[in-house]
Image (tube, helix red, strand yellow):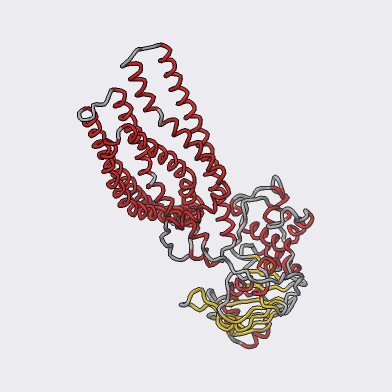
Amino acid sequence: MGKIRPMGYKNFITKLYAYLKNHLGKLIFTSLLMVLATALETSIPEITGRIVDDLFAGDRNNDTALLYAGILLIVIVISSLLALTSTAASSWVSNKVIMDLREDMFAKLLRMPKLYFDKNTTGKVLSKLTYDVEQIASAASIIWLSLIKSSVFVIILIGYLFYKSWELSLSLLVFLPLVYLIVKLSSNRMRASNTQVQQSMGNMTHLLDENISGNSLVKIYQAQAQERTKFGELIKNIRQQRFKVDMTSALNIVVVNILIGLSLSTVVYFSATYLQMSAGAFLSYFTAMGMLVKPAKSLININKPLQGAMAAGESVFGLMDEKEESNTGKIQLKDTKGNISFKNVCFAYSDKHQVLSHIDLDIKAGETVAIVGATGSGKSTIIQLLAKFYSINSGSIAIDGININEFELDSLRSQIAFVDQNVRLFNDSVKGNIALGQVDTMSNDRIENAAKVSNAYDFIQALSEKFDAQIGEDGVSLSGGQRQRLAIARAIAKDSPILILDEATSALDSATEQKVQAAIDEMQKNRTTIIIAHRLSTVKKADKIVVLQQGRIIEQGSHQELLDANGEYASLYQHQFS
């Protein structure tokens, strides 16, 4: 992922508007309710002033007292109900925006190239979908609602203050530029601190993920103290940055409070001396001034969550702007024969390290080809390129004579079944894992047959709920061999014409391996099969064995041909069986 660029207000609002535009009716309705509630609430100073002049400074008439008491109660009740309704509508919009953002982000992640996940830790990606989205959602409605309410409050109250006494109100305008300057100076500081908080939250999530998934390793190597120190440093950094944000916000409030104090003192002095206000007029003006304090502070405090939302926007919308996996092919690949051809293929994960150099390899339909070589020679990279998890730097890869770039990605991958040495199972039922991607359409007979062929049927039948049994996160309730057999069953059930086996029997004991190998031999019939192997005993029957060394093909041939050539393969074979 590239460096995140600072996001301006205009860009942030434009991107956020894309998620708000479908809820504009609710936002407008919410805003109108809040305006009405605020307008009613701002009438309280005038009502209070008249109560003082008409009741306490004049005749204390029971009917007049009842009228004013009724008006005051009605204003408070109606404004409170309107505020409650607008808050409920605002909360609905906020949570809908969170849901929509997360849905789009998850869909985006599913379309991202594998290289993105190679460069970004799981924790940082998870933090975007959890912490960062919440920060943006606060801007979607909470900030909006507070901005509407506080702005209306300030506008109406300032208008009312000018109406009551333009001389006093004019003198108060001197303080507004000072308030603006304070907010302006604090914005950059809060944005920087919020950005660091979000980055640290991503690092913390990653560290938690590592320690939860690798809990056994941490314990066996007694790394608890080391990991605790790392975690402590992370949360200390988060605490420090949040403290900076809070203190900057608190300092704003202190300075504004002092300015408000000066304003109120000015009102008290001039209204009692030069202007000679009545008790009711002074109380109305002073009450309005007092009510102005809270919305004024709210407008200033909005800056804190807004800067947090802006920093989160850089992270979330930065992900949404990432380049997706290239899928420009138009041809739907169906019922492929399985002829595969690599022509002068070169590939590097970065400019500094060439992984594959000038690979030329032809695999005939129905042929079984084994790729062997030392660790890091590029064996697994070849099959990653065939499935277009990465794009080659030069050369071409073709299936049935057509460049794989011409195929629509889903149709290309539908023709490939894959069993990896690092088995990945999902927190789902046995059936859901075998019928992955087709759980609603695959027949039970097909699922059961795949389990029988992979030698998984017996242990599945021993489970309490059989094929409906939940296997836990990554198949935690199963043994390594059982997990491997489920992965093989998944590939069998997919029934694709191209089969890729990357150390598919590595987690099995010798007895189980023989049974599964027999199942794999059966599965390979009428399929093009590519086998990645370290144990050369598993590739003797391959039609062709390809030997890789430092990203280059140095030998090709059958098992016996390569032994007779007495080259690298013969050396590897003798080393394993000597």
Q: Foreground residue, 147 or 341?
A: 147
Percent of width and height locating residue 92: 55, 41
Residue 158 figure quarter: top left
Q: Is 72 drawn above or below residue 355 in the view shown?
A: above
Point out the residue furthest to the bottom here: 565
Q: Foreground residue, 529 or 139?
A: 139
Q: Is 125 drawn above or below residue 154 in the view shown?
A: below
Percent of width and height locating residue 49: 34, 24
Q: Is residue 483 visible?
A: yes
Residue 162 figure quarter: top left
Residue 176 figure quarter: top left
Q: Foreground residue, 463 or 294?
A: 294
Q: Residue at x 25, y 36 (%)?
A: 261
Does 472 sit left or right of 136 as displayed?
right
Q: Is 175 drawn above or below residue 545 in the view shown?
A: above
The tally of labels here is 0
Does 519 sit left or right of 218 as displayed?
right
Q: Is residue 222 visible?
A: no
Q: Residue at x 43, y 43 (%)?
A: 147
Does 393 sit left or right of 410 as displayed?
left
Look at the image and tell me in which quarter the C terminus lies: bottom right
Percent of width and height locating residue 70: 46, 19
Q: Is 191 drawn above or below residue 273 in the view shown?
A: below
Percent of width and height locating residue 105: 55, 56
Point out the residue furthest to the right here: 445
